[in-house]
Amino acid sequence: MKMTIDLDNLKKIAKKGKDIFLKPEAEKELLKISFAIAELEEIYKEAKLELEKAALKKNPNFSSIESDKVKIFYRAFGQRFRLDEAVIKEVSSEMYSQSIKYSLDVKEIDRYFKEHKTLPYGINAVDRKKQITFKAK
């Protein structure tokens, strides 16, 4: 698949975001960007997978690759260990800390707000930033 994107035109469109409502060519360019991003993300994912396979084949213990312009790391993400809570009484308390987590029931808060026109005591609204998103139909 071959796709041509006029970056200069896109920069103009970006500066005149309101044109999306008036000009079909602006909509067409935004759709091109959306499709290109999705395609590039898939290509990037595939390239990383192929690089991982090739590097592990060459050295099963590799942790990084470095060239003149790029450094690639191979590392794990997330928790290193997991606590088996089924045997918690047998685990030394020095190996973990205990915490309490509170989760708000948004539906219940919305119901309360609708009924009382105010938030419940101890519950504060968060100032959330809105942003534009778009997708092809």
Image (cartoon, rainbow, N blue to C red):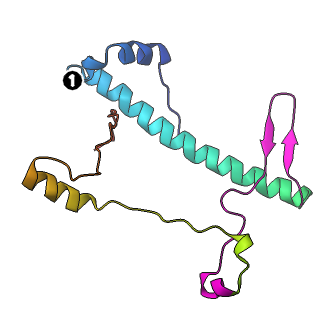
> How far from the left and from the top, in percent, is residue 130?
32, 34
Question: Where, quadrant-wise, is the C terminus in this rendering?
Answer: top left
Q: From what the image shows, is residue 88 above or below residue 34? A: below
Relative depth, front residue between 14 and 43: 14
Q: Label 1: which residue?
A: 21
Q: Relative to 32, is 7 above or below?
A: above
For the residue carrying disc 1, how many other residues have a C-alpha within 10 Å: few (<14), some (14-19), or many (20+)? Answer: few
Question: Residue at point 49% right, 18% down?
Answer: 7
Q: Is 4 displayed left or right of 27 in the figure?
A: right
Q: Is residue 13 magenta?
A: no
**Which residue is located at x 88 percent, y 54 percent?**
62
Residue 73 falls within the magenta-colored stretch:
yes
Q: Amino acid at mark 1?
A: Phe
Residue at 20 percent of width and 49 percent of height? 119
Q: Magenta stretch: dominant SS?
A: loop
110 or 47: nearer the viewer: 110
Query: Which quadrant of the structure image shows residue 16?
Result: top left
> Closer to the camera, 23 or 106?
106
**Residue at position x 79%, y 42% from top?**
72
Identify the secondary structure beneath mark 1: helix
Residue 108 drawn at (x, y percent): 21, 62
Could you say where residue 127 lies in the image, as x and y percent from the top left?
Answer: 32, 36
Name the one closer to the observer, 45 or 133. Answer: 133
Q: Is residue 76 left or right of residue 43?
A: right
The extreme left residue here reads 115
The stretch of residues the image draws in magenta is: 61-89
Count of number-bearing discs: 1
Looking at the image, residue 87 sits to the left or right of residue 54; the answer is left
Quadrant in the rendering for residue 96: bottom right
